[in-house]
Image (tube, grey):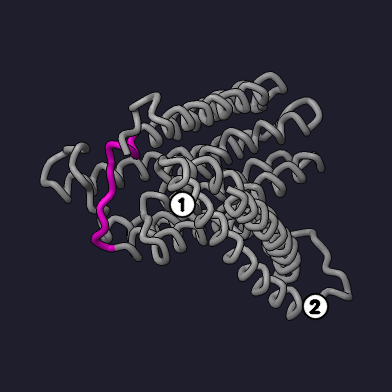
């Protein structure tokens, strides 16, 4: 257990440090190339803050042969992002988290569509795999549909660019700024994140062995939470600077990247591997419910009030309790 705790601490520290470097360098590079703010928040920054999740599914799948663990990390991270980050950002921001009508209709709506696409992806893969819709049977996730997910992210970027191409970035680049140094920092940060994620994944696999519990559940809350810290850091900082719309854009953009690119790439690299859709279904249901709750809160006056922010954190706390009860066999909704 001492080794496991050490791996968790070191892994989280490396992911945090690497992600902070990645985020700051990405902002500088965005300013240098004069990228519009909304694209920076929903695409550039989202990619940087989502790289831990990308590393997680790559390492879990390619090194440890644990596709289901990788999926749990991706979905767990999406749940963390959509509940915890708006909750903390809403508490940090004066008067709650305020977003404009354009943000509600575009970013949140696109994210909800992606969540539905993800659910359809799993169930359609099940139908293709078994020639019928039978979630009790092992499912081979469709590589063809995974390609559709990844390509859909390209459409998302194109849409973002088209809707913001007339908006100029007002950011100024310091004379001392070095584009080459920034790219170098990004490369170093990617290495740090990769090493940190490997430590986290190895720790939860060992934790599952020691406690005789599926690592699926520990990835769902421990690795997902640790890998989502960069998202939380970026969004809370933006909310603290009264940039609430960019804070929400980062959350939605990060989750869209996770569900389309990260999940899609993980499936492509593990072609032919089966998963237990019966176990994944309750987690997908919780993700959908969480998304609908956040949408309802934001649409009520285009804001997430302090009370609603605390409600989001309470919902996530209940999610953790549920996951722990599932891990130790007290509840059987997730048969894994």
In front: label 1 or label 2: 1
Is 46 drawn above or below residue 137 in the view shown? below
Q: Are marks 1 and 2 in contact (CB under 8 Å)?
A: no
Outermost residue on the left side: it is 131
Query: CA gap, disc 1 to disc 2?
Result: 41 Å
Residue at the spot of label 2: 178
Residue 87 in the figure: left or right of residue 292: right
Q: Position of residue 125 (x, y in %)?
A: 23, 49
Answer above or below: position of 26 versus 167.
Answer: below
Residue 214: which quarter of the image?
Answer: top left
Magenta span includes 144: no
Between residues 150 and 31, which one lies in front from this camera angle? Answer: 150
Q: Residue furthest bottom?
A: 180
Is residue 228 visible in this depiction of the protein? yes
Nearer the N terminus, badge 1 or badge 2?
2
Q: Residues within 10 Å of mark 2 (few under 14, many from 20)?
A: some
User: Which residue sits at x=39%, y=36%?
Assistant: 284
- As drawn, is 45 to the left or to the right of 150? right
Can residue 151 be seen in this snapshot?
Answer: no
Query: What residue is drawn where x is 72% and y is 73%?
Result: 185
- Badge 1 crowding class, 10 Å Cα cut-off, few under 14, some 14 to 19, many 20 or more, is many
In this picture, residue 9 sits left or right of residue 331: right
- For residue 181, which quarter of the picture? bottom right
- Give the percent coordinates (x, y) of residue 285: 39, 31
The location of residue 272, given as percent across then percent down, is 24, 61
Q: Which mark is residue 205?
A: 1
Q: Residue furthest right?
A: 175
Q: Which element is circle 1 on?
A: helix
- The magenta region covers 271-281
At horizontal 69% and vertical 19% (from top left) the residue drawn is 307
């Amino acid at each position: 257990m001492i080794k496991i705790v050490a791996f968790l601490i070191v892994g989280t520290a490396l992911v945090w440090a690497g992600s902070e470097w990645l985020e700051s360098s990405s902002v500088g590079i965005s300013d240098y190339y004069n990228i519009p703010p909304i694209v920076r928040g929903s695409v550039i920054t989202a990619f940087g803050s989502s790289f831990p999740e990308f590393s997680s599914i790559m390492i879990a799948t390619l090194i440890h042969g644990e596709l289901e663990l990788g999926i749990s990390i991706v979905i767990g991270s999406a749940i963390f992002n959509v509940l915890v980050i708006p909750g903390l950002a809403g508490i940090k921001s004066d008067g709650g988290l305020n977003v404009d009508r354009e943000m509600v209709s575009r970013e949140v709506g696109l994210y909800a569509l992606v969540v539905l696409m993800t659910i359809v992806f799993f169930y359609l893969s099940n139908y293709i795999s078994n020639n019928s819709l039978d979630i009790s049977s092992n499912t081979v996730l469709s590589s063809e549909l995974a390609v559709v997910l990844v390509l859909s992210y390209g459409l998302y970027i194109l849409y973002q660019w088209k809707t913001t191409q007339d908006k100029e970035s007002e950011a100024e680049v310091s004379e001392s700024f070095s584009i080459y140094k920034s790219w170098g920092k990004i490369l170093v940060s990617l290495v740090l994140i990769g090493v940190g994620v490997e430590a986290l994944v190895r720790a939860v696999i060992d934790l599952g062995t020691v406690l005789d519990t599926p690592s699926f559940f520990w990835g769902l809350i421990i690795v997902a939470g640790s890998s989502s810290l960069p998202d939380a850091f970026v969004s809370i900082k933006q909310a603290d600077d009264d940039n609430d719309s960019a804070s929400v854009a980062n959350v939605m953009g990060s989750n869209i990247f996770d569900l389309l690119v990260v999940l899609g790439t993980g499936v492509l690299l593990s072609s032919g591997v089966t998963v237990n859709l019966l176990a994944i279904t309750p987690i997908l249901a919780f993700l959908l419910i969480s998304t609908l709750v956040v949408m309802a809160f934001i649409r009520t006056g285009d804001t997430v009030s302090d009370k609603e922010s605390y409600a989001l954190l309470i919902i996530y706390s209940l999610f953790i309790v549920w996951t722990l009860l599932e891990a130790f066999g007290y509840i059987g909704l997730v048969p894994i």
